[in-house]
Amino acid sequence: MNNAFRRSRTVRVLATRRFHSSAVFASEDVRERLTAGVKQAMKSKDQAASTTLRSVLSEVYNLDKSSGSKLSSSAIVAILRKAVLRRTESAAEYIKGARPDLAEKESREAEIISEFLPPLLSEAEIDRVLKEVISECPRDSNPRKYTGMVFKSFYSKVDKSNVDADIVKSRAEILINDQSS
């Protein structure tokens, strides 16, 4: 009887914990994919993948603690993009330093992390949104102020983590100059 009571109590406690931990947050999709990736890498005994993903997750958890709340999905994607950039730059430096073994390791880690990134918007999609934004924004005599309004309106419609800022800037300048000519 005593063991049956313990088992039923344990089941209730675990069920309660499970219920509370499965609450859906905006950032859970990327966060859960990373966690599932770590579990899968550990099950398949892929040391490189598990170490890489654990380092990224630890960075996410550290920022969670420092901010006092869970990071949004876009913030996690930004962390992932920075991690990929950091590793590709490191690989380039290792190649310059005649260390192809370390360059290969960094490139492999960048590939592992990039599997968890959502695809960036294409130039055509960026152009479509920019044209829409440019048609909505009132023209200003100060070109810098007008460009700032266009960027502000663009980023209110599109998540920053889903676009390459350099492409947005170059396409916006081209479209604004085409409109003024």
Image (cartoon, rainbow, N blue to C red):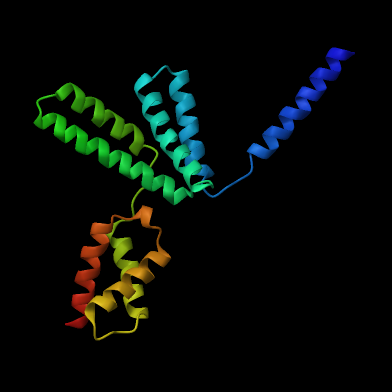
Q: Is residue 112 left or right of residue 173?
A: right
The tally of labels here is: 0
The location of residue 168, given as percent across then percent down, is: 27, 62
Which residue shows up at 76% across the image and 23% down it? 10
Residue 136 lies, with reference to residue 111, above or below; the image says below
| Side (left or right) of 56 relative to 175 | right
Name above or below for residue 108 compared with residue 143: above
Q: In this view, does 65 lie above or below 26?
A: above
Residue 118 appearing in the image: no
Q: Name the foreground residue: 112 vs 1.
A: 1
Asked if residue 158 can be seen in this view, the reply is: yes
Where is residue 66 drawn, in percent x and y? 47, 44
Rendered image quadrant of residue 145: bottom left
- Percent x, y for residue 149? 33, 75
Compared across the picture, whether 30 is left or right of 14 comes to left
- For image coordinates 36% across by 37% down, the residue present is 115
Coordinates of residue 74 in the picture (x, y in percent): 43, 51
Residue at the right extreme? 1
Residue at x 29%, y 84% (from the top left corner) = 139
In the picture, the quarter occupied by the C terminus is bottom left
Which residue is nearer to you in this view: 42 or 3? 3
Quarter of the figure that contains the N terminus:
top right
Residue at x 36% of width, y 69% of height? 152
Decide: is 160 above or below 135.
Answer: above
Instruction: Spot the residue most to the bottom.
Output: 141
Residue 93: which quarter of the image? Answer: top left
